[in-house]
Image: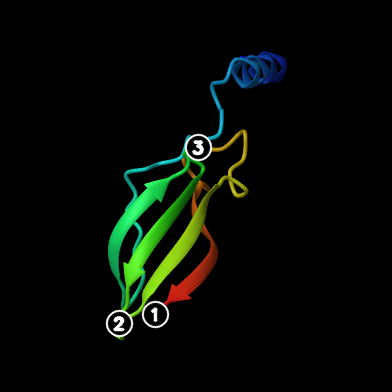
Amino acid sequence: MTPLTRLAGRLRNLLHGANMPPSPDATVEATYQGHSVVESHYSASGRFRAIITHHPGGYFGVHREQWDISGWEAGGTPGVGAGWGWCNHRRYH
């Protein structure tokens, strides 16, 4: 296989979606040290989720996460460099 043939194959795969970024993974459970997860809610697109936690001190927290593909590269291995990233947190008594 010549370098030109390999390049053509990579371009064809890229154009046809063989190396598309991974979709959000709803099977990955959120964990927050010292907090128990009460429930999780996902946006309609699945790209955002809200995690409700309960702290031993008695307050509840709402953590917003976004499916982050910034570390993913088109030529890389599917699923590598993608994951849930923390956006913000609110605390409620």
Question: What amino acid is found at the position of numbered circle 1 in the picture?
Answer: His
Which quadrant holds the C terminus? Answer: bottom left
At 56% from the left edge and 28% from the top edge, which residue is drawn? 20
Classify 10 Å Cα crowding around label 2: few (below 14), some (14-19), many (20 and above): few
Identify the residue at horizontal 64%, vertical 14% (top origin): 12
Label 1 with label 2: CB-CB less than 8 Å: yes
Name the image quarter holding residue 7.
Answer: top right
- Decide: few, some or many residues near mark 3? Use Cα within 10 Å; few <14, some 14-19, many ≥20: few
Q: Is residue 78 above or below residue 90?
A: above
The kind of residue on which mark 3 rests is: Thr
Question: Viewed as shown, does residue 86 lie left or right of 60?
Answer: right
Residue located at (61% from left, 34% from top): 75
Give the percent coordinates (x, y) of residue 29.
32, 54
| x, y percent for residue 11 | 68, 19
- Going from N to C along the chain, the mark reached first, 3 or 1, is 3
Tag in front: 3 or 1: 1
For label 1, the residue is 93
Q: Earlier in the sequence, mark 1 or mark 2?
A: 2
Which of these two is toward me, 32 or 57?
Answer: 57
Going by the picture, which residue comes out furthest to the front?
93
Q: Is residue 39 left or right of residue 15?
A: left
Q: Which mark is residue 77?
A: 3
Which of the 4 image quarters holds residue 5?
top right
Mark drawn on residue 58: 2
The image quarter in which residue 57 lies: bottom left
How far is mark 1 from mark 2, CA to CA? Answer: 7 Å
